[in-house]
Amino acid sequence: MEVILLRVGLTGGIASGKSTVSLLLKEKGIPVIDSDKIARDLVQSGSEALSEIAEAFGPGVLAADGTLDRTRLGQIVFADESKRRELEGMLHPRIMAAQDRWLEQMRARGDSPVAVVDAALMIESGGWERFDRIVVVDCDESHQMARLAEREGMDEETARARLASQMPLPEKAKYADRLVDNRGSLEDLKGRVDELAAWLLDSGLAARKKSD
């Protein structure tokens, strides 16, 4: 009999606290894969994706050692929507294929009834339709701006450009089966993630029981 796996998409805006939610879910024993890490692995030195990026955006996006200069690439794509979409067209299909391979590995292992894919642009890319549940981490734009300034050292103009490159959180929230409010303290968030983890595990176990 085929093992049922509840496939969960976790998303949110930049600096919304999505990575913290991922970490807390992992601490609860729920498998989570980080799509940012997938993207970093895809553009390692010598990779096909990195060669395509250098051809499309010029050798200036490569550092002296042949690795990707993320800062320079970011300056290019966040200043020009058409270039950002061109980059996404190169990376998103590869990222989604890697996500799907990982989900199949988790299903085959069968030791968890649920697995979570953490991806910032899941809604924008259309990839959300592949998941059984969508979880959106929600917060106010003022919180995002403050976190970008503190965490990344971004000035206001750069931070607003990054926010503008993504779907506004109120729009993303419309796709959510579950919202995680991150407007409070870390302790508040931990309590909400405890509730989220219980809901996900219950949903996954119910799906398996239904398939028996």
Image (cartoon, helix red, strand yellow):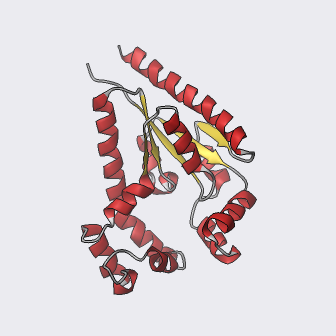
Q: Residue at x 41, y 26 (%)?
A: 113
On screen, residue 191 above or below 45: above
Q: Quadrant of the N terminus?
A: top left
Estimate the x, y position of residue 18 in percent, counting from the top left.
57, 49
Residues 192 and 94: in front is 192
Residues 47 and 28: in front is 28
Left of 71 or right of it: where is 66? Answer: left
On screen, residue 96 above or below 81: above
Estimate the x, y position of residue 139 in percent, counting from the top left.
70, 51
Q: Quadrant of the C terminus?
A: top left
Q: Residue at x 64, y 40 (%)?
A: 179
Left of 124 or right of it: where is 168? Answer: right
In the rendered image, is residue 192 in sight?
yes
Q: Quadrant of residue 48?
A: bottom left
Q: Residue at x 33, y 67 (%)?
A: 43
On screen, residue 50 above or below 178: below
Q: Residue at x 51, y 74 (%)?
A: 81
Estimate the x, y position of residue 183 in percent, counting from the top left.
74, 48
Residues 141 and 197: in front is 197
